[in-house]
């Protein structure tokens, strides 16, 4: 078990990095910028940017909201992220 100092989040793991990759891919497909998405999901641009760069992890609620506003099937996005994480292509 990893013990983290208070206030510090752990490094994103393979799955979190794969989710970030899939969200970036979705934004590219939909021609939506990170700044536009930030406004759509009620988060700051810096919050979204850190997660798109996989410096931090999106929350489950973030991913649900992103899928809803960009009309993407949640299970499809998560399945693609699992496949990517399993193959090590993150």
Image: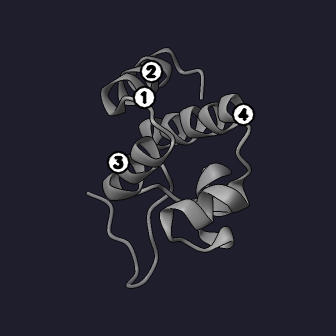
Q: Which residue is mark 4?
A: 28
Given residues 43 and 7, the one toward you in this image is: 43
* Separation of residues labelled 2 and 1 (CA atoms): 5 Å
Q: Which quarter of the figure has residue 82? A: top left
Q: Which residue is mark 2?
A: 80
The residue under the point 49% across, 51% down is: 12
Q: Which residue is mark 1?
A: 77
Q: Position of residue 85 (x, y in %)?
A: 46, 25
Q: Position of residue 78 (x, y in %)?
A: 37, 30
Where is the C terminus found, in terms of image quarters? Answer: top right
Q: Crowding at label 3, few (<14), some or many (≥20) Cα neighbours within 10 Å?
A: some
Given residues 90 and 1, the one toward you in this image is: 90
- The number of callouts visible is 4
Given residues 40 and 2, the one toward you in this image is: 40
Where is the N terminus found, in terms of image quarters? Answer: bottom left
Which scheme is used to colour this image of the protein?
Answer: one colour
* Separation of residues labelled 1 and 4 (CA atoms): 14 Å
**Which one is earlier in the sequence, the residue at label 4 or at label 3?**
4
Given residues 77 and 51, the one toward you in this image is: 77
* Separation of residues labelled 3 and 2 (CA atoms): 15 Å
Cβ–Cβ under 8 Å for marks 2 and 1: yes
Q: Is residue 81 above or below residue 19?
A: above
Q: Is residue 29 above or below residue 66?
A: above
State the mark number for residue 64.
Answer: 3
């Amino acid at each position: 078990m990893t013990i983290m100092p208070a206030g510090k989040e752990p490094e994103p793991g393979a799955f979190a990095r794969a989710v970030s990759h899939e969200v970036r891919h979705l934004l590219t497909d939909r021609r939506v910028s990170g700044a536009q998405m930030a406004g759509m999901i009620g988060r700051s641009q810096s919050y979204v940017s850190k997660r798109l760069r996989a410096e931090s992890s999106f929350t489950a609620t973030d991913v649900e909201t992103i899928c809803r506003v960009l009309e993407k099937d949640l299970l499809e996005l998560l399945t693609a992220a699992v496949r990517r994480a399993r193959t090590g292509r993150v």
